[in-house]
Amino acid sequence: MNISIAQGIIGTSAIISAISALMFGVFDDNLYRYRIGRRFGRRPLMLMLIAPSLLIGVLLWIPGSPVPLYACVYVLWVVLAQAFQACYNPLPGEMTKDFSQRTKLSTTRMFISTSAATFIPLAGSWALSIYGETKATAYMVVAIISTLMFSCAGVITWKRTWELTPDEAGFGEYANGTVHESHLGLRGWIRRVAHVMREYATTLRIREFRKHLTIFLLVQTSSDVFGQTFLFFVLYDWNKTAAFASLLLGCSIVSLPFMPAFGKAVVRFGVRKLYAFGLCRNAAWRGLAGIGMDSDGCSARCSMDGAVRYRIVVVPCIVFKALVGYLPWTVLVFMPDIDQIVTRRYRSATFSSVQSSLRQLGSGIVTIGVGMVLAMVGFDSSLPQQSWKASIGVAVVMLGFCTVSMIVCWIVPSRLIINQQTDLDVLHEVERLRAGGDKADVDSSVRRTVERLTGLPYEECWK
């Protein structure tokens, strides 16, 4: 496939996924309004339906199908993955209210996902060395097995996790029968759509969520750019093989033992300090750039031996995968707590969907942009060698975007104040108000914390 067509399909699918995220988030959060949601649960019902549907992804890896079929299956796949995230991401925040236990759950989740992101490229490298790099067999075998494992993991998650009850989630009036959903006509559905849009818009009122969202989007889009260009960088700027690129991505295996330590560090030191430490990966990116491009037409060969160069590449894998990629997902768990003192409801899927929607929208725009830039510099993935201009273009896109993103990310986390104590203050205040406490009796320090986290006067909270 032409590079611009391939990137266009991926980018368009990401934009469609962004729209679908907005649908699934509010839908999942409000399933307790309906009898089927109260019977099977909000998250379990979605997981039960999505887990077997994920097997549609197998069709992506069968060679010889027409391009329109690949495009349709890919769109369906990303929509299903988005629906899965809408009901999966809220689980750590709903299974416990304890800061340490939530962090432990998020750390376990990230440990498993990092393991998958580590071992799948290693498996790909092994399969490529067996089947060869000119055939689709290696990709087909590894991807189909991975898809089957993903579906099985979805079934396990459905059977072995739990969520907030309707009363705890703020839908007690539906559970005890005091409020019933009436039949909606056309005007009713229009009002419902407008209400859904307002639901999403209100999440952006939370100051701490806006800061978190800025960091998350920059980290994720820079990761997208890196993922889309790193293989080309290895092939054409280093003159290495695709198997070597997969092996290199698998080097993040060394980060796995550090994951539990990062979880404990979040509890002990707080998010802000860890972000400051993690964003030192700028040095790692500069190390990648300093290795130099290995193409004969681009620059002179680097004088460092292979072992030293290999170690330099391992460093960004450790920092990027193990810490900076870990922190945003851990922080997201605490955003619905802050929102709860404003809206009186626990809207974890809504927050997750806003984040996922903007993440997919950003990914789609960045992906299309990368495809356009690479096409403009004359990049052609079907050629065994690229022109000097195309090789430089790959390096500039990969390293330049990441560098600019990390500079911005270095500034924003200094203003984050979410930590174990501030989250505990908010949760205790919610419990006090829910038990009938008077807003006028709020402690002055708790009042300041609430106002700093929400960005709203305390009087506008808990209406």
Image (spheres, rainbow, N blue to C red):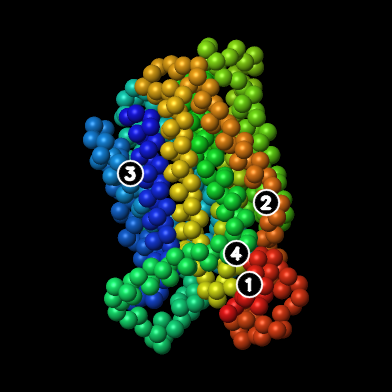
Snapshot quadrant of residue 137 = top left
> How packed is label 1: few (under 14 Cα within 10 Å), some, or many (20 or more)?
some
How far across and how far down the image is residue 241, in percent?
45, 21
Against 41, residue 15 (above or below) is above
* First reached walking from the N terminus: tag 3 or tag 2: 3
Name the residue that disc number 3 marks.
Answer: 74
Distance Cα–Cα, label 2 vs label 4: 16 Å
Q: Which mark is residue 206?
A: 4
Name the residue that disc number 2 marks.
Answer: 413
Is label 4 in a helix, a strand or a loop? Answer: loop
Is label 3 in a helix, a strand or a loop? Answer: helix
Against 406, residue 201 (above or below) is below
Is label 2 in a helix, a strand or a loop? Answer: helix
Amino acid of disc 3: Tyr
* First reached walking from the N terminus: tag 4 or tag 3: 3
How far across and how far down the image is residue 202, in percent?
53, 66
Amino acid of disc 4: Ile
Amino acid of disc 2: Pro
Snapshot quadrant of residue 452 = bottom right
Residue 152 seen in this snapshot: no
Contact check, label 3 and label 2, Cβ < 8 Å: no
Q: Foreground residue, 48 or 362?
A: 362
Amino acid of disc 1: Leu
Residue at left offset 60%, top offset 41%: 405
Against 378, residue 213 (above or below) is below
Name the residue that disc number 1 marks.
Answer: 427
Residue 390 seen in this snapshot: yes
Give the total of numbered labels: 4
